[in-house]
Amino acid sequence: MTSHPWHRDGRLHFAVGVEDTFVPQSRPGERAIDEYALTEHYDKWHGDLALASDAGAELVRWGVPWHRIEPGPGRWDWSWLDAVMDRFAQLRLRPVVDLMHYGTPLWMDGQFANPDYPKRVAEYGAAVAERYAHLGVTDYTPVNEPMIHALFTGEYAYWPPYLSGPEGLSAMAGQLARGFVQTQRAIGDVLDDAVFVHVDAGMRFTGDTDAPEHREHAARLKEQVFLVEDLVTGRVGDDHPLAPFLRGHGWGDGDFAWFAEAPVRPDVVGVNYYPLHSTEVFEAGVFHGGGFLDPRPVRDDGTAGLAELLRGAAERYGAPVMLTETCVTGTVAARLAWLDESVAALHDLRASGVDVVGYTWWPLFDMYEWTYRHSQEPREAHRLTMGLWELQERADGLARVRTPIADRFRHHADRAAAQAIR
């Protein structure tokens, strides 16, 4: 693997991602979710990484299963992860290591609400960074989609620790942000050349946002999208639009002071954008709580929404931006069309002066919807056709079936690499 600062070399880099949601806790009526187990990646990782290379990807957004490598506090099992990281090096693929993708280890009582969570997650992040420094693994996302984390664990009571309401949201945003800061600092102490890719879900809100029954809620949501990133970068003071909300739901002067004194910066700001889901519509006279259980209607704003979110992130944080997840769930033809349209949109943004450094198709192969957790149906009932390769049930396990999207992705990746050489 190379060690050049890829995010500053002027190129558009192509990446793929392996879906890595881990919520290992279960309870009656709720199954654990481990996407590596569901997709059989724990067994097929060697070939899966070769697929990424075959598709022409330079980077792979890939997550570490914390619950597997630290099965007990301070007790590490590196055997599987060592082999995977060696494979990355062998293939000359650059992992952007996703340290936290929704789930804590089973031994952590209270999960994100555990007072030791920020310290524990930082120790884990530093341990991973130190172990693989010799392989040139330098690129890290401390926590993927922290605001989605905060919503699902702190407002919707959908994932552990099942907090709810504005108090739960405020508490989880604070805990996740503290862990984020401490993890980045701990990795920075280990790696002088670390590259930090901060990733959150791009969300847009449109429709009747100024209707009296929606105005206050919509205004909060538009700022809430940025809350964790604003916290970790030291942007949340008393003049922040969400300061009254936080103060009204458990935050005191000490909380604000902690983040003001300990900011961390992104080297790259990642935006996850799904055209079929990322724009929510408010309707006058109709109330939807929002979220997984009571979703608002959505609108497909295509590349216009994508461009708006990437441009806004670049302006807000003054850093290079990357499309860190995108796809459509649908037919091969629909996926091909979105791949072409979204890649063209990124080239247009770059031509207009926006510092866009990366494009990520997510996922490399199909994944299973989070509804699997609350279902008793077999995994195939929850498969989402999203990948460059589709998953097909066979007697000997899940086959990876190549689609024309993989070839088209390779075309775009090779073309970008060739243009950079000229």
Image (cartoon, helix red, strand yellow):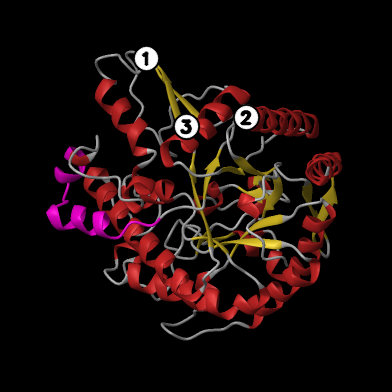
Residue hosting label 1: 208
Marks 2, 1: nearer the viewer? 2
What amino acid is labelled 3 in the image?
Gly
Q: CA distance from mark 3 to mark 1?
A: 22 Å
Q: Is residue 166 left or right of residue 35?
A: left
Q: Could you tell me if the residues under marks 2 and 1 are in contact, i.e. CB atoms within 8 Å?
A: no
Above or below: residue 128 compared with residue 307: below
Secondary structure under tag 3 reads helix
Q: Which residue is mark 3?
A: 312
**Which quadrant would the C terminus be assigned to in this image?**
top right
Crowding at label 1, few (<14), some or many (≥20) Cα neighbours within 10 Å?
some
With 110 as the anchor, is 344 left or right in this view? right
Residue at numbered disc 2 = 349
Q: Earlier in the sequence, mark 3 or mark 1?
A: 1
Q: Secondary structure at mark 2?
A: helix
What amino acid type is highlighted by mark number 2? Answer: Leu
Q: Amino acid at mark 1?
A: Asp
The stretch in magenta equals 244-264
Q: Earlier in the sequence, mark 3 or mark 2?
A: 3
Please give the name of the residue rendered at 25% of the width and 54% of the height, measured from the top-left corner.
260
N-term mark: 2 or 1: 1
Q: Report the residue at 74% width, 62% height from top.
A: 93
The answer for how far apart the CA atoms under marks 2 and 1 are is: 29 Å
